[in-house]
Image (tube, grey):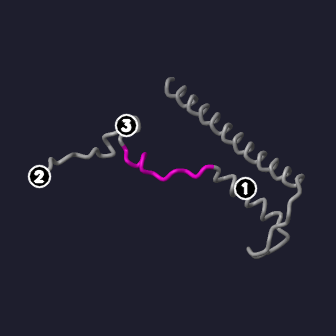
Amino acid sequence: MKRENRRRMSPGVGYIGFGNKTSVFTRKNKVPFDKIKSIYRDEMERLKPGKTTQNKSFKKLTESEKLKIRKRVKAQIQKEQIVNLIMGVIAILFIFWVLYLISN
């Protein structure tokens, strides 16, 4: 006996909120804290006493040095957030200005 041909739901039949684009729900996930890893890597390279191979161990950091690095990283992240906020406000003001010019 032949089984009935069952139809599989295609990915586009699902939730319509993102416009049925398969690229939205099949894309690769973003790695969390990706920027923080690069910032800490830059800090560690800055603290290295010259060229070292990977087999050599890193210099042991004291608590005060660790705290300084954390503060630097936090300040850098806050600076990026402030720049993004300012750029957003400028973009919104520019949009309102263009809309004002169009309406007149």
Q: Residues within 10 Å of mark 1 (few under 14, many from 20)?
A: some
What kind of element bears circle 2? loop
Q: State the residue lying farthest toward the left.
A: 1
Q: CA distance from mark 3 to mark 2?
A: 32 Å
Q: Nearer the viewer, mark 3 or mark 2?
A: 2
Q: CA distance from mark 1 to mark 2?
A: 61 Å
Q: Residue at x 22, y 46 (%)?
A: 7
What kind of element bears circle 1? helix
Q: CA distance from mark 1 to mark 3?
A: 38 Å
| In the image: residue 96, left or right of residue 43 | left
| In the image: residue 3, left or right of residue 37 | left
- Amino acid carrying label 1: it is Ile
Residue toward you, 88 or 22: 22
Q: Which residue is mark 2?
A: 2
| In the image: residue 102, left or right of residue 62 | left
Q: Quadrant of residue 46?
A: bottom right
